[in-house]
Amino acid sequence: MRKISRLASVAMALALSAGAASAADLIPYPAAGAYNATTYAFTATTTGDLTAAIVGGFSAGYTNELGVLVNGVAQGGFGLNNHTSVLGDTYNFGPVTAGDSLIFVLHNLSRGLDAFSLASMNLAYDSVGYAGGHNHVYSTAYTATPALGGVAPGVYVGFEDLAFPGSDYNYTDESFVFRNITRTPAGVPEPATWAMLVMGLGLVGAGLRARRPATAAA
């Protein structure tokens, strides 16, 4: 019975963790002050216009704008200035085709330099001689929990605009949401995945219970 009880406890803990994970979006970057070593690749999900909504970066010291490279080619110019835009403002970068590769660009007007969502492109942005990581973005699912203004659910991306290694690593200096993109890695397991794991543990517990020998009558 102790084995089954332990399995039940694990299942309950996982269920509670899943509920907590799904209760609120991990926005902004939850490990501010620490470098984000997770890198991302972004692609267009469907064919149509690529539109971004700004959701943060309004108090950043540098003045930034957002751009995009579609299959390595700049498209749509720059928009969503973090000091003149307001929460929920949108910018249309033009048409994309499902499967197109997307690299987001932080156009830092204050420094006259660009940072990219592709870490390998940021060598020139960071301090000369810096040999550490160069990832300047944090990304996660945005389900509007809680809602950021009236912005619809999508994929959240936040840029860090300070050069490494002398950065505050908060990844909130130009933050936006896209609806028509997919990111890799996709992030934490979906609630349905946790539910299947909990069900599996329950079945294991049932199997152990069935194999337990009957207790002899007193």
Image (tube, helix red, strand yellow):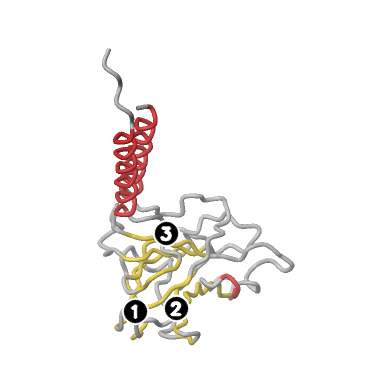
Q: Which residue is mark 2?
A: 102
- In the rendered structure, the answer to whether residue 179 lies left or right of residue 113 reads left
- Residue type of the residue flagged with mark 1: Leu
Q: Which mark is residue 22?
A: none
Q: Earlier in the sequence, mark 3 or mark 2?
A: 2
Percent position (x, y) of residue 29?
46, 54
Q: State the residue at coordinates (28%, 57%).
A: 144
Q: Nearer the viewer, mark 3 or mark 1?
A: 3
With respect to residue 203, does 177 lie above or below?
below
The reply to whether the C-beta atoms of the residues labelled 3 and 1 are less than 8 Å apart is no
What residue is disc 3 on? 187
Judge from the rendering whether residue 118 lies leftward or rightward of residue 207; answer left or right: right
Q: Please state which of residues 181 and 189 is positioned toward the viewer in this rendering.
A: 189
Front-most of 107 and 61? 107
Most foreground residue, 135 or 67: 135
Identify which amino acid the numbered label 2 is placed on.
Answer: Leu
Which residue occupies 65% across, 57% down?
Answer: 166
Tell me where residue 19 sits by quadrant: top left
Q: Are marks 2 and 1 in contact (CB under 8 Å)?
A: yes
Query: Which residue position is annotated with label 1?
Result: 50
Q: Kindly check if marks 3 and 2 are in contact, taking CB atoms under 8 A apart as contact.
A: no
